[in-house]
Amino acid sequence: MKLKQPEEYFISRKIDDFFSGLYNATKFILLFFREALKPPYEFKEIVKQCYEVGYRSLALITLTGFVTGFVFTKQSRPSLAQFGATSWLPSLVAIAIIRALAPLVTALIAAGKVGSNIGAELGSMKVTEQIDAMEVSAVNPFKFLVVSRVLATTITLPILMCYTGFVGMLGAFINVNQNEQTSFTAFFQQAFSNITFLDIFSSVVKAIVFGFTIGIVGCYKGFHATQGTEGVGRAANASVVLSMFLIFMEEMLIVQITNNIRG
Amino acid sequence: MESTTIGEEVITIKDLHKSFGSKHVLRGVDLQVCKGENVVVLGRSGTGKSVLIKIISRLLKPDSGTVKVLGREVDKLNDKELQQLRLKIGFSFQNSALYDSMTVGENLEFPLVRNSKHLKRKEINIAVETVLKAVGLSEAIDQMPAELSGGQRKRIGIARTLILRPEIMLYDEPTAGLDPITCIEINNLINLVKEQYNTTSIIITHDLTCAKATGDRVAMLLDGTFVKQGSFEEVFASDDKRIQDFYNYNFTNK
């Protein structure tokens, strides 16, 4: 897909660039859905990319998830203790982790680790003509490179999010267990007593949306990298920055919608 | 401007124009390439030589003019027709464009597996071994592109295009950045490909040794248009000062 560039500026360069960028991004997303639904499907490549996404993020997600749960619990305790409500700690932590922290922490880490990697990898393939080489050998580079990566991030993020949630809760349990000697079963029973189906469903939806965003932004930036190695660095950087910005915007939007449903 | 036509025309380009922003790169290019012919397009860097073959394979679209390949107007093909046509065109890139994350063997089978789904694993392996043997690099099958020398990368790049048995070969600066001995080896390989695979080729270069060794016909691209076509000797017997300068600089400043 070639980028459409305005040759004469209607308003100003920046405003015109913004709208032509929006147009190109929309076209890119529509092309993704067209190619994703059209056979043949690159199953092998999708599985390979799923493994790459999971493998690349797992260590950092384990550490961050655990620390988040542990520290959040530790920091919340003094405030709750003032009201003699430390017994509410498991519920409070579970709500915070499942509703907000797990999807957000997973997405931000994946944006940094996976998004930048996709941007750099595709950017490097673009500037070294590897994408052109696929095209001239009658292979659809969009299907092979973009569709497989976007599907991989979209599928893998909810799984990683569940894992982050679990590790985060484990971190919280260890802290609670150190102070209140609560058993594993009692902690988790209390933690999940206030969690509804909507909480879990909205988090999974968030993770799917975040995963799609990370994949599509990384691929878009990489696929349209220009100006040699400098362009590759720029594509990687822009993938992370734009993904994170969009993740925060989407988080606000989904929270608003979920709260309206919750009433 | 002269043109030589022997037999059936495989590539026909008429009044081709291409600009990038305010830079008018191709200004009314005409070229006919006949079956079995090796045509060398010579010219200075930035004169639009690579743009020309990218338009032939529709990696780029022209601003105006027509390009016919094997009787089909390239610009008017739909996705499926373009894919069919591209199976008949081999494109050897200047930097080889090997897929960094794949081994040599995987690089070679990549286009074959995706375009011939009926092939069995054994047939794919035989095809890979055959093209590797043709380019003289049978032992490189398990190596990664980063482990290969410049000349080896070029050979593997050519092998990857040969695996689809193309009718037309487009070479973009095949000897750029190589030492003189490797250049001769690549020139010999281009001639070997023509003989063994019966290809018609366009070779983009600014290397006169390559042009002389591989070209049945030479076309000189200057200021966005072909100013002279003919045999190597005919072209450089021209009185045009720009052609003479190109010849002299190529040999004296090397």
Image (cartoon, coloured by chain):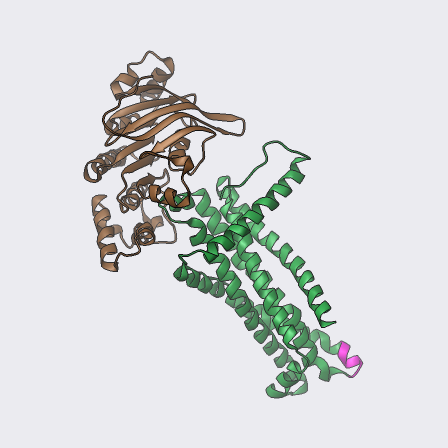
Chain colours: A green, B brown
- Majority SS type along the magenta span: helix
Question: Residue B123 lies in what quarter of the image?
Answer: bottom left
Residue A194 shown left or right of residue B177 in the figure: right
> Residue A195, percent across and down?
66, 78
Which residue appears at 28% of the width and 57% of the height? B118
Frontmost residue, B28 versus A129: B28
Residue lying farthest top? B239
x and y, in percent, of residue A207 in the image: 58, 65
Q: Does A116 lie within the magenta span? A: no
Residue span colored magenta: A79-84
Residue A236 in view of the camera: no
x and y, in percent, of residue B250 in the image: 33, 23
Residue A172 or residue A262, whichever sits in front: A262
B174, above or below B142, in the image: above
Q: Which of A241 and A205 is in front in this view?
A: A205
User: In what quadrant of the picture does the C terminus of chain A appear?
Assistant: bottom right
Relative height, residue A213 to residue B60 (above, below): below
Q: In this view, does A4 lie above or below A28?
A: above
Q: Percent x, y for residue A79? A: 77, 76
The residue at 76%/81% (across/down) is A81
> Would you place residue B145 above or below residue A42 in this image?
above
Could one spot residue A85 in this view of the protein?
A: yes
User: Which residue appears farthest toward the right when viewing the image?
Assistant: A83
User: Which residue is drawn at the image coordinates 39% and 36% (left, top)?
Assistant: B74
Whether A82 is among the magenta residues is yes
Q: Name the side, left or right, on which A16 lies relative to B79.
A: right
Residue B162 picture quarter: top left
The residue under the point 33% across, 39% down is: B92
